[in-house]
Amino acid sequence: MNEKEIYALMNANPVFHLATVEGDQPRVRGMLLFRADENGLIFHTASTKDVYTQIMNNPKVEMCFSGNGTQVRVTGVLENVTDDELKEEIFNHPSRKFLQAWKEKGIDSLLQIFRMRDCEAITWTMETNFVKKEPIQLCNK
């Protein structure tokens, strides 16, 4: 797969698993991607969640996406994004209607946005199961 095909797979299958570390204990949970393109992999969470604290303490993470018989693991470092325009885009996006309640309750400040740039992806399929993995650079504008 090339970089554009990987972004397409991620955007078509936005549910991914995120691995973080808490102390010396790995933690994995399902998350929802907002967008993947050459500018970065973007998702969000609430500042009240354990995953937020784990990322802030150690921003090195791995994401795992899957679709069409292909698994894509992406390794990199997350940055906490403070961009009011992007925040409004997320709140107003049709796939994020569940966030409108946050705005109505005045707790929209809980929304924390993360972006991964300059990262590496490894792809896997049953056909390539025993082939040496070659990292593919993503989002390294």
Image: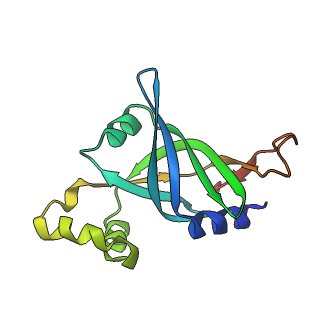
Give the image location of residue 6, x and y in percent: 69, 61
Q: What is the number of callouts on the image?
A: 0
Give the image location of residue 51, x and y in percent: 36, 41
Give the image location of residue 134, x and y in percent: 81, 44
In front here: 1 or 37?
1
Q: Quarter of the image holding residue 5?
A: bottom right
Instruction: Say if 12 sits above or below 60 in the image.
Output: below
The reply, left or right, for residue 99 in relation to residue 135 is left
- Which residue is at 19% across, 69% downward? 101
- Which residue is at 52% across, 63% downward? 14
Give the image location of residue 47, x and y in percent: 27, 47
Instruction: Say if 76 sits above or below 112 in the image.
Output: above
Instruction: Say if 42 sits above or below 20 in the image.
Output: below
In front here: 88 or 128?
128
Instruction: Say if 93 sits above or below 127 in the image.
Output: below
- Which residue is at 44% across, 32% downward? 58
Which of the image's four quarters has the C terminus? bottom right
Which of the image's four quarters has the N terminus? bottom right
The reply, left or right, for residue 114 in relation to residue 139 is left
- Which residue is at 14% across, 71% downward? 104
The residue most toward the left is: 105
Way the structure is coloured: rainbow
The reply, left or right, for residue 23 in relation to residue 53 is right
